[in-house]
Amino acid sequence: MNQTAMEAVIIEHVKQILPQQIEIEPTTKLLETGIDSMSFIRLVVLLEEAFNIVIEDEEILLENFTSVETIRNLIRKCLDSKG
C-alpha cells in the first residue's frame, strides 16, 4: 500500500473517533483535536484490524500518535517487521 492510500485509511479511522467533525491532514496535531485516551485505544484497535497488524504495547506511546504521519510511520514499521 502506498503512502497516500495508507494515510487515507488512517484519516478515515481518526475521523471515526473524533468527538467532532474537523478536517484532518497528515500533519494535523491529533492531541489538539480533543481525542481522549479511550479514543486512542479504540484507534489502535481500528488500525490493527484495518492493516492486519499488532501494535505492541511498548509502541503505544503518544509520540507515535501525534499526527497521521507518525501513525503511518508506526504502521509501516509494524508491517515491515511482520514480513
Image (cartoon, grey):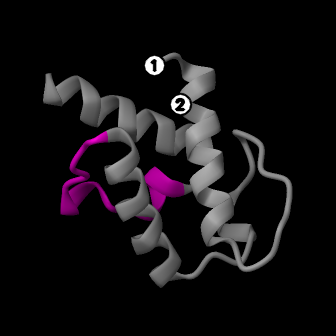
Q: Earlier in the sequence, mark 2 or mark 1?
A: 1
Q: Position of residue 77 (x, y in %)?
A: 30, 31
Q: Which residue is mark 2?
A: 6
Q: Position of residue 25 (x, y in %)?
A: 77, 43
Comparing 1 with 28, the one in front is 1
Residue range in magenta is: 52-65
Quadrant of the frame with the C terminus: top left
Residue name at image x 25 percent, y 43 percent: 53
Q: Position of residue 6 (x, y in %)?
A: 53, 30
Label 1 sits on a secondary structure element that is loop
| Residue type, mark 1 in image | Met
| Residue type, mark 2 in image | Met
Quadrant of the frame with the N terminus: top left
Comparing 71 with 1, the one in front is 1
* Res. 67 visible in picture: no
Residue 1's tag is 1
Above/below status of 83 relative to 34? above
Above/below status of 4 relative to 60? above
Residue 65's tag is none
